[in-house]
Amino acid sequence: MAALVFGLLLFAIQSPPVPSRPVADEGATPPPTLPSPPSTGHPNGTLQQLPQIIIIGVRKGGTRALIEMLSLHSAVAAAQNEVHFFDWESHFQKGLSWYLSQMPYSFPDQLTVEKTPAYFTSSKVPKRIHQMNPDIKLLLILRDPTERVLSDYTQVFYNRLQKHKHYQPIESVLVKDGKINLEYKALNRSMYYVHMQNWLKYFPQDSIHIVDGDQLIRDPFPEMKKVERFLKLEPQINASNFYFNKTKGFYCLRDHGQERCLHDSKGRAHPHVAPAILQKLYQFFHEPNKKFFELS
């Protein structure tokens, strides 16, 4: 596991990180100021709190599964939607008071968590989150970079298919002129080392917990115990909270007798990729890993 986790952090290439959507010049927007606490809370004693935990990515790494599993813990209150506060300029300019309004109501002793997978690859986000709370806990869930690329393509493929839009065969986006197509954004999102360097400018490594997304799919319980320890939560999530759904082909959740599974869009089969192209992809990501292992 250690080799996988640390190996995934060394995808160093020359391409710059790709923001989730265009943003203005960094100097144009001053950092938001912390809003005053709400004057009144909910009648049951709950209130909206800025998150103490953020799942920063990575896209198609398993962020939805992670936040749903973390929500099993009674000390955690999770935002249901991706807020996109720190990466979308139109949201960021509304300030932290707007961000606060997007958070769930929670009890004072609960931890609030939100997840926006695009945060990880957005160049301005680390600084902005640090300005809000330099002590925040960050969760980053990573999968094998090749598998993540294929999942990324699969999501876009089905979205375009449902909208009756044209889509490009996967081989045409992965390879250009016989070489790996570095202009393909999905590849950039799997270059974990490049983006991690930006986060480490603002946060120490012990503020970022890396979840093994591939292991979370195969056996979620051990990974969630590690998350509990990182967040210093009282042990509460247990093996009985997970059961394998043979029909869907992945683990579902069981909470106080209620069972729920992720949306059917999760766990879709990847498209067939020609073995030669798939091998190019594996080789592209393998060499940086090897160099990292030699340095460690």
Image (spheres, helix red, strand yellow):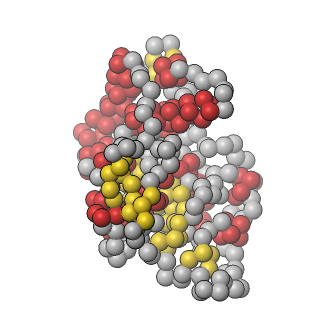
> With respect to residue 162, does 55 lie above or below?
below
Taking the image as shown, residue 127 lies to the left or right of residue 29, namely left
Q: Nearer the viewer, residue 263 or 135?
A: 263
Taking the image as shown, residue 187 lies to the left or right of residue 295, namely right
State the residue at coordinates (51%, 27%).
182
Residue 211 image-quadrant placement: bottom left
Taking the image as shown, residue 133 lies to the left or right of residue 26, namely left
Q: Position of residue 272 (x, y in %)?
A: 41, 23
Q: Position of residue 269 (x, y in %)?
A: 42, 33
Residue 91 image-quadrant placement: bottom right
- Tally of numbered discs: 0
> With respect to residue 51, does 264 lie above or below?
above
Q: Position of residue 194 (x, y in %)?
A: 47, 42
Q: Nearer the viewer, residue 138 or 24?
A: 138
State the residue at coordinates (50%, 23%).
170
The answer to whether any part of residue 144 appears in the image is yes
Taking the image as shown, residue 127 lies to the left or right of residue 259, namely right
The answer to whether any part of residue 214 appears in the image is no
State the residue at coordinates (50%, 48%).
263
State the residue at coordinates (59%, 86%).
45
Q: Nearer the viewer, residue 74 or 39?
A: 74
